[in-house]
Image (spheres, rainbow, N blue to C red):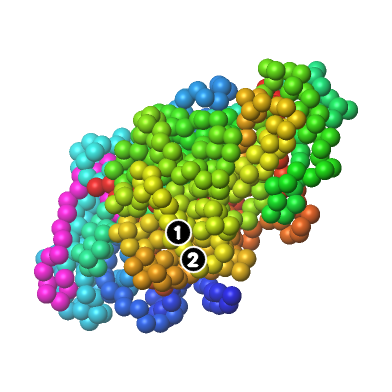
């Protein structure tokens, strides 16, 4: 039995301290605009095992875009819109108020209702009812947080999305998926040999990954729901670095046969192998552009590793990065406007964000062995692997560099190779 | 450089999920989904999931284990035989096979030439600096260098497979050059080892 806990640390660049907030997180810095919101405790169901309003508050707070107001000590804690005395909340500067209720219904299920109200206009911004099994409580809370985030920021919420990552505990490797807040970790595959490079299918139902279980790197594709898995590539030499095309029809992979790494594409069923790069250098770490037209990759064809791009069906590569002596692991923002990659900055490996239109590059992470950047599906956050006192951990930074989080594996193992999954509905 | 002067995050909350790893003695490739997954936070709760409302999508687990073969009575495993020497070390940023490893390469070439059915896997390794996939490619370069040395001694490609472990078998958190040097390595493995 394996118990896993994640710890979240938030460091923001603002200096508002939320005394006694539901989550008791201190914030330091100054200047960002945060939306003040009152998330009132949900009424009903004492037998519900999860506290929906606390999960919603934690999600919104962690995003760095919300100031979650203290509700304890308030005389009136309504659970439906008609009970809200708006003046009490606008006095606290709340721009929005949420109320909700959980009640037991037939079959051991729960009915969750929720309303997001504009505190100034006193109008409803969103209202939802869910009929759920007890096990769906957290997921429902994340969906509610997504609705609030979307209504109040105009951007897609990512709280109901999932992340994949590799843990190493003792000599055991495991590919796991968890909710975006680190809860509910589940093992997808475990092995005594290394597992690296997990990659989500665009529909979020499958993971491609590299397993060394046969004493060499082989690419597998595994269904998350059925557990069935298939070898995608097991050619002579190395098989690695799977990356899905945006439509899910094929993957870019890296094969070596008896020579250096080169990029190929293969149908998601395993057929239709096609060589994309032909060089005597290292070509690896392919990533499709969101429009599917290009494959970006790392190559040392110019002497030092830099990022290049090649048409997705083959052709002449051209160089993308020119600054710095080591730029690898390109990953696209979902809108295709930015590229995240790892730069060796004077011996420190850090996440860089490259605006493709302006060519401007910003170093976002502050570790020395940062790896594996991965954009959240709304493009606002980049998840990456870091080292904390020699131990592998995950970290996240907002794409504007203002909000930072760190996620540790509580059992003392290593966690690495994160990949943020897509929004699935 | 002066990162996080007042790093003051607190432990927010903790979720515990039980994952029961089911031991599996089958061959490495058996696609045996080890199914036991309790997604709830307590053992007492029901596992019924339906598609109403918000989905908590389940995940089926697969366990794979490699077989460790026992050492037989053969020259490749005899500690007094040079064929039991399987490590070739490299200089920094180099894939040149150094002269001191020549006898090892020659002995293995001779063995492969005498045993046409023997198959060798040459595994390249790197230290932990840099990204995993890029290091996989760098390790491959060293394995290719050893293969070429074997080719020059007459060994055919069909008896050699070059693969890389990248940094996956590297000693981590190296503090000095002696440690890094141990990671700049090619391991020779025979099929059936």
Neighbor class of circle 2 (other Cα within 10 Å; few <14, some 14-19, many 20+) is few
Which residue: 36% across, 46% down? A312
Give the side of residue A129 with respect to residue A405, left or right: left
Residue A422: x %, y % from top left: 33, 49
Distance between mark 1 and mark 2 Cα atoms: 8 Å
**What's drawn in magenta, residue-wise?**
A118-142
Residue B57 visible to an observer of this rendering: no
Q: In x, y percent, where is residue A209?
A: 47, 40
Label 2: which secondary element: loop
Who's the residue at 80% across and 19% down the image?
Answer: B74
Q: Is residue A108 left or right of residue A6?
A: left
Location of residue B100 (image quadrant): top right
In magenta stretch: residue A102: no
Judge left or right: residue A25 versus residue A169.
left
The residue singled out by tag 2 in the image is A322
Q: What element carries label 1?
A: strand
Query: Which residue bears the numbered disc 1?
Result: A319
Q: Picture coordinates of residue A267 (x, y %)?
A: 36, 34
Point 67% across, 43% down: residue = B142
From the top left corner, tell me how far across and down residue A88 is, in percent: 20, 78
* Quarter assignment of residue A359: bottom left
Q: Do the residues labelled 1 and 2 touch (CB within 8 Å)?
A: yes
Looking at the rendered image, the quarter that the N terminus of chain A falls into is top right
Left or right: A396 with respect to B89?
Answer: left
How many residues crowd around disc 1 within 10 Å: few (fewer than 14), some, or many (20 or more)? some
């Amino acid at each position: 039995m394996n118990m896993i806990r994640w710890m979240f640390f938030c460091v923001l660049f603002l200096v508002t301290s939320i005394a006694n907030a539901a989550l008791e997180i201190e914030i330091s810095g100054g200047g960002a605009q945060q939306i003040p919101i009152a998330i009132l405790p949900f009424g009903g169901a004492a037998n519900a095992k999860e506290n929906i309003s606390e999960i919603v508050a934690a999600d919104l707070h962690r995003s760095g875009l919300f100031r979650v107001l203290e509700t304890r000590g308030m005389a009136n804690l309504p659970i439906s819109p008609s009970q809200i005395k708006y003046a009490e909340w606008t006095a606290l500067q709340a721009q929005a108020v949420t109320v909700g209720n959980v009640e037991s219904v037939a079959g051991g299920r729960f009915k969750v209702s929720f309303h997001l109200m504009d505190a100034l206009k006193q109008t409803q911004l969103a209202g939802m009812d869910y009929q759920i099994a007890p096990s769906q409580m957290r997921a429902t809370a994340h969906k509610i947080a997504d609705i609030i985030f979307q209504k109040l920021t105009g951007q897609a919420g990512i709280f109901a999305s999932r992340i994949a990552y590799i843990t190493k505990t003792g000599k055991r490797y495991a590919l796991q998926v968890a909710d975006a807040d680190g809860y509910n970790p589940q093992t997808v595959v475990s092995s005594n040999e290394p597992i690296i490079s997990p990659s989500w299918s665009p529909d979020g139902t499958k993971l491609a990954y590299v397993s060394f279980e046969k004493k060499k790197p082989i690419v597998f594709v595994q269904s998350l729901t059925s557990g069935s898995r298939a070898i995608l590539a097991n050619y002579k030499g190395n098989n690695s670095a799977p990356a899905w095309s945006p439509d899910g029809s094929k993957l870019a992979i890296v094969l070596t046969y008896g020579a250096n790494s080169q990029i190929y594409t293969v149908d998601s069923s395993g057929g239709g192998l096609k060589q994309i790069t032909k060089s005597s250098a290292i070509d690896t770490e392919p990533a499709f552009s969101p429009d599917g037209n290009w494959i970006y990759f790392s190559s040392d064809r110019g002497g030092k590793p830099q990022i290049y791009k090649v048409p997705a069906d083959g052709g002449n590569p051209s160089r993308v990065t020119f600054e710095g002596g080591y730029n690898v692991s390109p990953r696209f923002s979902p809108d295709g406007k930015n590229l995240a990659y790892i730069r060796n900055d004077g011996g420190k490996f850090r996440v860089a964000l490259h605006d493709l239109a302006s060519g401007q590059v910003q170093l976002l992470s502050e570790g020395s062995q940062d790896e594996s950047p991965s954009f959240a599906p709304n493009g606002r956050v980049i998840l990456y692997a870091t080292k904390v006192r020699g131990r592998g951990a995950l970290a996240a930074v907002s794409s504007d560099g203002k909000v930072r989080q760190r996620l540790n594996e509580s059992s003392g193992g290593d966690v690495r190779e994160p990949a943020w999954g897509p929004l699935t509905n | 450089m002066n990162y996080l002067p007042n790093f003051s995050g607190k432990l927010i909350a903790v979720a515990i999920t039980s994952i029961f790893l089911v031991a599996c003695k089958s061959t490495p490739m058996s696609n045996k989904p080890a199914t036991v997954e309790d997604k709830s936070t307590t053992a007492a709760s029901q596992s019924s999931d339906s598609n109403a409302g918000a989905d908590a999508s389940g995940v089926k687990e697969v366990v794979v284990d490699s077989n460790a073969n026992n050492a037989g009575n053969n020259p490749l495993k005899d500690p007094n035989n040079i064929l039991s020497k399987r490590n070739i070390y490299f200089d920094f940023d180099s894939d040149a096979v150094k002269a001191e490893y020549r006898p090892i390469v020659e002995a293995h070439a001779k063995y492969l030439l005498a045993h046409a059915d023997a198959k060798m896997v040459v595994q390249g390794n790197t230290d932990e600096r840099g990204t995993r996939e890029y290091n996989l490619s760098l390790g491959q370069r060293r394995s290719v260098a050893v293969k070429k040395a074997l080719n020059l001694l007459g060994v055919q490609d069909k008896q050699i497979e070059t693969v890389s472990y990248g940094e996956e078998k590297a000693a981590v958190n190296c503090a000095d050059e002696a440690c890094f040097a141990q990671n700049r390595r090619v391991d020779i493995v025979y099929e059936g080892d």
